[in-house]
Image (tube, rainbow, N blue to C red):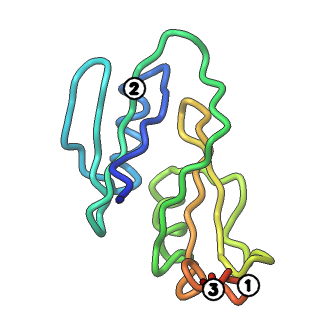
Amino acid sequence: MNLNQITLPVNDMQAAVDFYLKLGMTQIVDTPHYARFSCPEGDSTFSLALQAEPVHNQAVIYFESNNLDAKVNDLTQRGIQFDQPPQDMPYLWREAILHDPAGNKIKLYHAGENRLNPPWRVTKTA
């Protein structure tokens, strides 16, 4: 099984589209109520769905960057505001935190080998 995409709720489609384009995503679907993007690396996609009621999403979307500090610096210069600059976390990832215009939480991170193989990885034995 492979994860196809994640869909985030938004209240202002144009503001959200502009935000994700500024992050460097490529828009592949554009309708008034739905937008879909491909990530600049790999084959992952995600989408936005317009909703009338306020967004109260508790999910966090993670976008990995091999050069996190440079990426955050570039985005900051492009007007993206971060709630947390890049920090080394106790779980061995380096993360920066921001929110999209609808309030969806985003973490830009770099985990390297620790993404799939942290020191505490569970090894199953039969």
The residue mark sitting in front, 3 or 1, is 3
* Disc nearest the viewer among 2 and 1: 1
Distance of label 2 from label 1 (alpha carbons): 37 Å
Q: Position of residue 75 (x, y in %)?
A: 48, 60
Residue that carries the numbered disc 2 in the rendered image: 49
- If you read the primary sequence from the N terminus, does the residue marked by circle 2 or circle 1 appear first? 2
Q: Earlier in the sequence, mark 3 or mark 2?
A: 2
Q: Residue furthest right?
A: 90
- In screen coordinates, is 23 left or right of 114? left
Please report whichever mark, 3 or 1, sits nearer to the chain's N-terminal start.
1
Left or right: residue 71 compared with residue 3: right
Label 2 SS: strand
Secondary structure type for disc 3: loop
Q: Residues within 10 Å of mark 2 (few under 14, many from 20)?
A: some
Which label was assigned to residue 125? 3
Q: Residue at x 57, y 69 (%)?
A: 109
Query: What quarter of the picture does the C terminus occupy?
Result: bottom right
Residue 11 placement (x, y as % from top left): 49, 20
Question: Residue sitting at 32 percent across and 51 percent down?
Answer: 45
Q: Amino acid at mark 2?
A: Ala
Numbered badge on residue 120: 1
Identify the residue at image location x=53%, y=75%. 68
Q: What residue is rendered at 76% in x and 75% in y?
A: 89
Secondary element at tag 1: loop
Q: Nearer the viewer, residue 41 or 70?
A: 41
